[in-house]
Amino acid sequence: MFCFRHTKTSTVLSCSRCGQPICIDCLVQTVVGNRCFICSRASENIFFRLSFWTIIKVFLATTFAAVFISLIMILINLFTLNLKSPIYTGMFFLYGILIISGFIIGEVISAVSNHKRGIVLKTASIYGLSIIVIAMIFGNGIVFSDFLNMYGAVSVLLACFLCVRKF
């Protein structure tokens, strides 16, 4: 038997998928056995492959969505600041919007990346959520300790779960 690429090289090996004879130079070790270079590339998972431009589009869309949600949160804080209630209701509105924004950021990234998966998309979703949290701290006058109470911690954790759940 001779290798299908190197026709002068004698071999006893063959691809475990297509059965073509392969030499040592063409051999690719995989979990399921020896494969030729064509069959080994076909087994790559297409859900995790992202092009450079897709990554750029994902981070740009995440930034725009996070800035838009942050502006909405600042406006809501301005409108609820004058409410005369014993409990500061604006904080609970912001916690709710933070949870909803985690879901929105995840959906935006999923739509822009054509429903791909991977660590880059998880990083982009946490990046978008961190923009919103930073805007809550600096734009709404919320101190960091507000995220350490029960409602703040639960809202941040829920928002993180909702934004990375698809990836």
Image: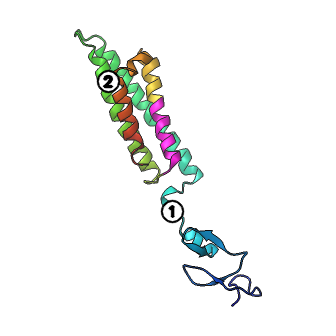
- What amino acid is labelled 1 in the image? Asn
Crowd class of label 1 (few under 14; some 14 to 19; many from 20; radius 10 Å)? few
Crowding near pointer 2: few (<14 within 10 Å), some, many (20+)? some
Identify the image quadrant of residue 4.
Answer: bottom right
- Left or right for 154, reference 143: left
Instruction: Say if the magenta span includes residue 119.
Output: yes
Q: Residue at x 38, y 18 (%)?
A: 146
Q: Earlier in the sequence, mark 1 or mark 2?
A: 1
Magenta segment main secondary structure: helix
> Of helix, strand and loop, which one carries label 1?
loop
Residue 151 is tagged as 2
Disc 2 residue type? Tyr
Q: Is residue 52 visible?
A: yes
Asked if residue 125 is among those painted magenta in the image, a careful observer would answer yes
- Disc number for residue 45: 1
Q: Is residue 21 left or right of residue 113?
A: right
Where does the magenta region start and end? 118-130
Residue 48: x %, y % from top left: 51, 56
Closest to the observer, 54 or 24: 24
Q: CA distance from mark 1 to mark 2?
A: 39 Å
Q: Position of residue 33 (x, y in %)?
A: 57, 73
Q: Is residue 2 above or below residue 42?
A: below
Instruction: Identify the residue at image location x=46%, y=54%.
Output: 116
Q: Which quadrant of the structure image shows residue 50?
A: bottom right
